[in-house]
């Protein structure tokens, strides 16, 4: 069975850039959760998640972002979500999570 | 009276096949003439119901059926899952995100039903 | 022994819904791990069978079911249509294009069957 | 129910340019057939059909191209198919129609 999500990390100075592409749903999220939480726990810098190639996100994905945010907040760091598609940003607005993450164009 | 066409998709209750439901839902709503934003809304809402069925489903519910009832200006989507324990899937749920999303994106939501029929509906604007 | 997952799509025998079958077929074959060209082949071949069922179907066959049998390295697609007159859908047909396409794109084709089961199959290269 | 195919014509000198976009299948083909045959019958110039935005074609569509070709051949004209996607060109090769139409990049 093929995965639908690609995940890449790149350190740059005071933050880690994470590039995700494809569909982040209940199926692809297990793998994503493991990678993102590992990074959130093992570093103490901001996470900048680049989402211009993220095509689909569901509540499972939202939950994982929240879980990662809890982890980085313990170290007073933040998660930046960059270039969300409109249809995905809408889900952050519906759930109120647009006030919890730093959403950037 | 409108004619109603019915399309049924029956599949294993497994996370790996929610993407198949999403594509079928896109196809149906695109064919009905929903605009791109509404097609995305329908896809997302249907997938959230599937996600929830998968996460609460027991071994009694190995399969489920998504029933698309297509009329000129309205899509009803019914979820049929043999497991009676799924009567009220979002009851006391920790998946608030999923329920908020479904409520925001669909026009009618009935996910807690005495007759075990879960359904969500969306109307095509200006086409009734 | 491989596990086989089964996805069934049941729908009206109407031209307007072949695009829904195509999207479902894309979803299934994408999830199975077929490459992009093979996904397109499967979509095209399945649609050609649907086209033919629609063009030969009588009033006895208002609906049909497309059954996807999914195993690790192989997709079987079965077409189930109540109408017994569809036993041999491409027999003496003027739709040579459709049949040539199906034969070229799929690995196994059984469109003329005594038990009224029409099926086409494709194998994932290097995955058996 | 929404159509999936758009059709536009533009006369230019000794030919008619036809631009088709979307999916040409058993559902959208009825409308397409009417337009293309009307043009094929009412003019006696070459038809240049531009297919760069044609995403899907089935045997119904192939049949209509053949029917249109019969009509223009009666006037010794031709049909040019321009910029077919690989997956669509493949269908012309399978059916031998790549030898019947003039296929151009
Ligand atoms: N679908 C959801 N709806 C609402 N909140 C959710 C959802 N999924 C996860 N959460 C929230 O996100 C947090 C992170 O989820 P998770 O990673 O499963 O927990 P943990 O941080 O305990 O490992 C949870 O504590 C929960 O508050
Ligand atoms: N699916 C098909 N397979 C093979 N040949 C076809 C197919 N569809 C159409 N044709 C051929 O294309 C020609 C044009 O089709 P059509 O427009 O229906 O006929 P006509 O030109 O008589 O109006 C037909 O004469 C037939 O030879």
Image (cartoon, coloured by chain):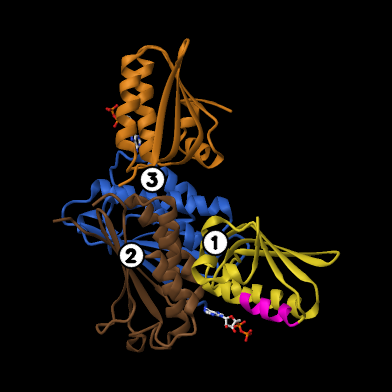
Chain colours: A yellow, B brown, C blue, D orange
Q: Is residue A62 above or below residue D52?
A: below
Mark 3 residue element: helix
Q: Magenta residues: mostly which secondary structure? A: helix
Total numbered labels: 3
Q: Which residue is mark 2?
A: B107
Mark 2 residue element: loop
Mark 1 residue element: helix
Q: Residue at x 47, y 54 (%)?
A: C42
Identify the magenta region.
Answer: A66-74
Q: Position of residue A12 (x, y in %)?
A: 84, 63
Q: Which residue is mark 3?
A: C99
Callouts 2 and 3 on one subunit: no
Q: Is residue A8 above or below residue D89?
A: below
Q: Position of residue B54 (x, y in %)?
A: 46, 79
Looking at the picture, tell me which residue is in the foreground, C123 or A52: A52
Q: Residue at x 48, y 47 (%)?
A: C104
Q: Residue at x 35, y 55 (%)?
A: C111
In-image side of D61 versus B51 (left or right): left
Real-space Cα separation, disc 2 to disc 1, in angstroms = 19 Å
Real-space Cα separation, disc 2 to disc 3, in angstroms = 44 Å
Residue A72 is covered by the magenta coloring: yes
Placement of the N terminus of chain A among the 4 image quadrants: bottom right
Instruction: Please tell me whether mark 2 or mark 3 is closer to you in this view.
Output: 2
Looking at the picture, tell me which residue is in the foreground, B128 or D56: B128
Which residue appears farthest toward the right when viewing the image? A13
**Badge 3, how many Cα within 10 Å: few under 14, some, many 20+?**
many
Looking at the picture, tell me which residue is in the foreground, C29 or C100: C29
Residue A100: numbered disc:
none
């Amino acid at each position: 069975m093929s995965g639908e999500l690609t995940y890449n990390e790149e350190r740059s100075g005071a933050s880690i850039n994470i590039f995700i592409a494809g569909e982040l749903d209940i199926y692809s999220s297990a793998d994503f959760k493991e990678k993102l939480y590992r990074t959130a726990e093992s570093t103490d810098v901001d996470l900048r998640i680049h989402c211009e190639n993220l095509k689909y996100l569901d509540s499972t994905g939202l939950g994982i972002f929240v879980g990662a945010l809890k982890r980085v907040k313990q170290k007073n760091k933040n998660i930046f979500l960059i270039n969300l598609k409109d249809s995905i940003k809408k889900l952050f607005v519906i759930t109120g999570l647009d006030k919890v993450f730093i959403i950037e164009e | 009276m409108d004619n109603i066409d019915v399309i049924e998709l029956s599949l294993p209750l497994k996370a790996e096949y929610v993407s198949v439901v999403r594509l079928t839902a896109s196809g149906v709503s695109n064919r009905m003439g929903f605009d791109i934003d509404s097609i995305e809304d329908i896809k997302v809402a249907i997938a959230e119901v599937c996600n929830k069925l998968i996460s609460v489903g027991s071994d009694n519910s190995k399969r489920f059926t998504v029933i698309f009832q297509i009329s000129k200006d309205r899509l009803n989507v019914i979820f049929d899952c043999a497991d009676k324990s799924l009567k009220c899937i979002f009851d006391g749920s920790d998946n608030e995100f999923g329920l908020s999303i479904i409520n925001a994106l669909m026009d009618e939501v009935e996910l807690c039903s005495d007759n075990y029929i879960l359904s969500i509906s969306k109307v095509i604007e200006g086409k009734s």
